[in-house]
């Protein structure tokens, strides 16, 4: 599966309608972004059940701002609509594969319980 281009108009729907979504925040002038792009694209072909999406920070500055993107490339991993990972920097292929395995292996019931417990703590 090829990568999907995200904008403010389709970001929320894409993240909420798919089990796992990896989002690459990038810009055409960014050297590390250009180095990471083929790694990201290759992973998209070997993991057809995962949505690999890209946000051009030049075309979507509001979206980048909403997520506090300060450095690019920044990779985010969402599962069941929950942001699980966000880190700046281009990952080598092996590290991206490891991240994908970790996201796939997570017990999302446990993650949601942990989020709920943290929310209860803040409220109390």
Image (tube, rainbow, N blue to C red):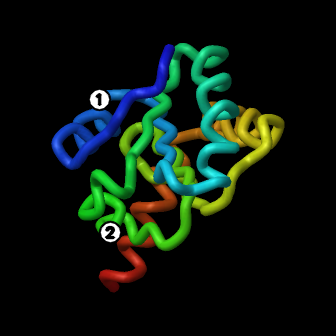
SS of the residue under disc 1: helix
SS of the residue under disc 2: helix
Residue 75, position as x, y percentages in the image: 56, 51
* Residue 65 image label: 2
Q: Is residue 79 above or below residue 71?
A: above
Residue found 44% across the figure and 67% down from its top: 69
Instruction: Name the residue at the left extreme.
Output: 9
Residue found 74% across the figure and 33% down from its top: 97
Q: Which residue is mark 1?
A: 17
Classify residue 54 by image quadrant: top left
Q: Is residue 17 above or below residue 118?
A: above
Residue found 61% across the figure and 62% down from its top: 88
Q: Would you call the spot at circle 2 few (<14 residues within 10 Å), some (14-19), or many (20 or more)?
A: few
Classify residue 89 by image quadrant: bottom right
Q: Nearer the viewer, residue 34 or 84?
A: 34
Instruction: Name the residue at the right extreme.
Output: 94
Report the quarter where the C terminus lies. bottom left
Residue 106, position as x, y percentages in the image: 62, 40
- Tag 1 or tag 2, which sits nearer the N-term? 1
Q: Is residue 96 above or below residue 30?
A: above
Are discs 2 and 1 less than 8 Å apart at CB?
no
Residue 46, position as x, y percentages in the image: 66, 15
Residue 58, position as x, y percentages in the image: 35, 57
Q: Nearer the viewer, mark 2 or mark 1?
A: 2
Q: Would you call the spot at circle 1 few (<14 residues within 10 Å), some (14-19), or many (20 or more)?
A: few
Q: CA distance from mark 2 to mark 1?
A: 23 Å
């Amino acid at each position: 599966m090829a990568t999907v281009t995200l904008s403010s108009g389709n970001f929320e729907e894409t993240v909420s309608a798919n089990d796992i979504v990896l989002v690459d925040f990038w810009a055409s002038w960014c050297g590390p972004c250009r180095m990471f792009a083929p790694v990201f694209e290759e992973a998209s072909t070997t993991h057809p059940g995962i949505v690999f999406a890209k946000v051009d920070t030049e075309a979507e500055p509001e979206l980048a701002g909403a997520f506090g993107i300060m450095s690019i490339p920044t990779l985010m991993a969402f599962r069941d609509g929950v942001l699980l990972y966000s880190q700046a920097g281009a990952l080598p292929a092996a590290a991206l594969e490891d991240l994908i395995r970790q996201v796939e292996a997570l017990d999302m019931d446990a993650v949601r319980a942990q989020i709920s417990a943290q929310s209860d703590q803040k409220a109390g």
